[in-house]
Image (cartoon, rainbow, N blue to C red):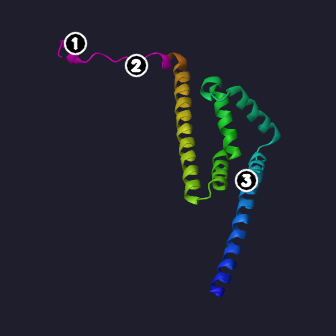
Amino acid sequence: MGILKAIGRFFGGITRKLAVRSRWLAKRLWLVMLADIALTTHRHWRRLAPEERKRLLELARKSEGRPAKNLSRRERREASDLLDKLGHIEYAGNVAGIVLPFRPLSRLAAKFLEGRRQRAKRELAKADAAEDAARASGGAPEAEAAEPARRAPSPDAAAGAP
């Protein structure tokens, strides 16, 4: 019996020390995470030239979080180009990888953000194409967008058919 008690105390002592060390590490691990995020942010931010950084900040302030409402189409295009150069989708994936320890979750977050970005780019390209087409025809794009599409009456409607 004495030997079993000694083995129990030995393993109990080791597990207790590991639990204390784990608690100490868990309390300080967020500092390591924040430092890693800060380094990642710095790395991505340095991809832009100083003038580009300044302009991106100006556009972000001007947009007030609502670029569709507070920025012109040209400014939205400029902000989009600067964000692409910054690598904001890659940055979000890197931060997700740091914060979310389970790798499939961080990959899923990065794919979700990339899909949103591609949809936004397609919409911006469609709007640019519509604006160019309106300019080519001599009309204003805002007037065309505000005016509802009118259809010619169908032959059935003209004949009074239900």
Most foreground residue, 141 or 34: 34
Q: Quadrant of the C terminus?
A: top left
- Dot 1 corresponds to which residue? 158
Q: Quadrant of the N terminus?
A: bottom right
Q: Residue 84's image quarter?
A: top right
Going from N to C along the chain, the mark reached first, 2 or 1, is: 2
Is 85 within the magenta? no
Going from N to C along the chain, the mark reached first, 3 or 2, is: 3
Most foreground residue, 143 or 111: 111
- Alpha carbon separation for disc pair 3 and 1: 72 Å
Most foreground residue, 134 or 10: 10
- Is residue 45 placed above or below 57 in the rendered structure? below
Q: Please say whether residue 138 is visible from this viewpoint.
A: no
- Dot 2 corresponds to which residue? 149
- Is residue 93 placed above or below 154 in the rendered structure? below
- Alpha carbon separation for disc pair 2 and 1: 19 Å
What residue span does the magenta drawing correspond to?
Answer: 144-162
Expressed as whole percent of the image width and height from the top left, the position of residue 140 reads: 55, 17
Q: Furthest-right residue in view?
A: 50
Asked which secondary structure carries label 1, the reply is: helix
Expressed as whole percent of the image width and height from the top left, the position of residue 88 reads: 66, 45
- Dot 3 corresponds to which residue? 30
The residue sitting at 22% across, 12% down in the picture is 158
For the residue marked with disc 1, what is the amino acid? Ala
